[in-house]
Image: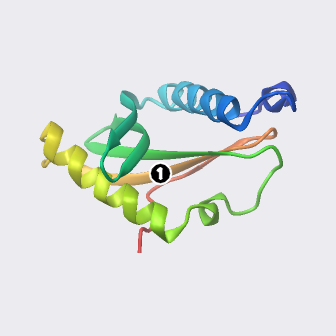
Amino acid sequence: MKLYGEFFDKNLSSREIGQLAEDLACKYLEYCNYQILQRNYHCRFGEIDIVCLKDNSLVFVEVKARRKPFINPEESISKHKLACISKSILTYIDEYDFHDKIINIDVLAISSKEIKHIKNIDVE
């Protein structure tokens, strides 16, 4: 999916870019037949950017946006961040009773050139 360079206008704050990236990520996921359940889920362990369903899987999506293209966006997620995401996922599953679903963690890496969808990342 190609993007326009204006998306990463230098006058936008990092927070504004993050919000726009999450909006674009939701549109991309819906285009790919994911059902968005929730955005910006917060619990005591942290935040999950997007929670969605695809087939029989509950997918937790971390959105990463950068002004410059990057090679390995998944590397920009620290082990600490992954641990917080994992704990947040367990809290979400308990809170919304999704114990019967397959769980996946995806990364959507968004640059001014492309969206890179990395499915089912390793959390170890």
Q: Secondary structure at mark 1?
A: strand
Q: Amino acid at mark 1?
A: Asp
Tell me if 62 is positioned left or right of 9 in this view: left
Report the quarter where the C terminus lies.
Answer: bottom left
The image quarter in which residue 114 lies: top right
Q: Residue pushed farthest front? A: 44
Residue 1, how many percent across, how many down? 70, 34
Residue 101 in view (yes/no): no
Residue that extends furthest to the bottom in the rendered view of this protein: 124
Residue under numbered circle 1:
106
**Residue 5 is drawn in which quadrant?**
top right
Dot 1 crowding, Cα within 10 Å, few <14, some 14–19, many 20+: some
The residue nearer to you, when weighing 87 against 21, is 87
Q: Please name the residue shown 81% across and 32% down the image.
A: 8
- Find residue 3 and report its horizontal and vertical position in percent: 77, 30
Q: Position of residue 11 (x, y in %)?
A: 85, 27
Q: Is residue 106 left or right of residue 38?
A: right
Tell me where residue 18 appears, x and y as whole percent: 63, 35
Residue 90 visible in the snapshot: yes
Which residue is depicted at the point 76% across and 33% down? 2
Q: Residue at x 65, y 27 (%)?
A: 20
Q: Who's the residue at 74% across and 46% down the image?
A: 66
